[in-house]
């Protein structure tokens, strides 16, 4: 069920309970002929703000990358940086869910969720460009692996919390977010390697 259908159902239920049509401030009242239904008003309002409740995406919204394209980027960068492609893919899966246009609430961007300062330091000029993002993110995890003598667990923790936090605590920092992140990435890593162990 899409959001329009769900909201229509809510509006209908409100009308059943109150005996009056559901009205939201700022939206026009429903026409007597039903032309201004709650769902259609919501869709027009969201479309005006650049959202599309139908799930089809706004006409100018970038499409998700095909998995084969992400796999090619991962493979090329893994080879050039000598990093296990399964680790890169596990980071992407947990950072952005393979959404090249993802932005976190703290401003991390793209497939590998690079912070603007980190991206700039890695030579990434457009963190939403999948090729630049994966190249930069792979270079970053390679640097962390080198820094922590190939310890994947510590490198992954540093990817999330920063190398300073890992050094300060002498291991995975005691932050719930980082501990969950490390567990999830290592689980994905094992899955992508296909052997069940990181």
Image: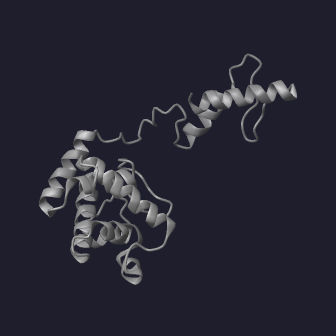
x, y percent for residue 62: 37, 42
Task: Tell me if residue 142 comes above or below residue 75 in the rendering.
Answer: below
| Residue at the limit of the structure toward the top, as seen here | 33
* Residue drawn at (87%, 25%) of the image: 19
* Residue drawn at (51%, 60%) of the image: 105
Task: Tell me if residue 90 comes above or below residue 26 in the rendering.
Answer: below
Colour logic: one colour
Q: Which quadrant, please, contains the C terminus? A: bottom left
Q: Nearer the viewer, residue 66 or 42?
A: 66
x, y percent for residue 169: 41, 81
| Residue at the limit of the structure toward the right, as seen here | 19
On the question of residue 143 being in view, the answer is yes
Q: Going by the image, does 123 lie left or right of 76?
A: right
x, y percent for residue 73: 21, 50
Q: Nearer the viewer, residue 83 or 121?
A: 83
Q: Going by the image, does 33 lie left or right of 75?
A: right
On the question of residue 128 being in view, the answer is no
x, y percent for residue 113: 37, 59
């Amino acid at each position: 069920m899409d959001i329009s259908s769900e909201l229509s159902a809510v509006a209908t239920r409100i009308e059943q309970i109150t005996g009056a049509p559901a009205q939201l401030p700022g939206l026009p009242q429903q026409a007597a002929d039903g032309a201004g239904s709650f769902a259609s008003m919501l869709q027009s309002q969201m479309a005006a703000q650049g959202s599309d409740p139908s799930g089809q995406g706004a006409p100018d919204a970038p499409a998700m990358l095909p998995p084969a394209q992400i796999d090619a980027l991962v493979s090329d960068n893994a080879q050039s940086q000598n990093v296990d492609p399964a680790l890169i893919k596990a980071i992407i899966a947990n950072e952005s869910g393979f959404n090249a246009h993802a932005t976190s609430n703290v401003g991390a961007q793209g497939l590998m969720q690079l912070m603007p300062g980190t991206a700039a330091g890695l030579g990434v000029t457009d963190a939403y460009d999948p090729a630049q993002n994966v190249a930069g993110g792979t270079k970053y995890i390679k640097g962390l692996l080198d820094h922590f003598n190939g310890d994947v667990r510590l490198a992954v923790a540093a990817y999330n919390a920063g190398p300073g936090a890992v050094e300060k605590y002498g291991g995975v920092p005691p932050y719930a977010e980082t501990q969950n992140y490390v567990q999830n990435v290592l689980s994905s890593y094992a899955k992508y390697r296909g052997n069940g162990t990181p």
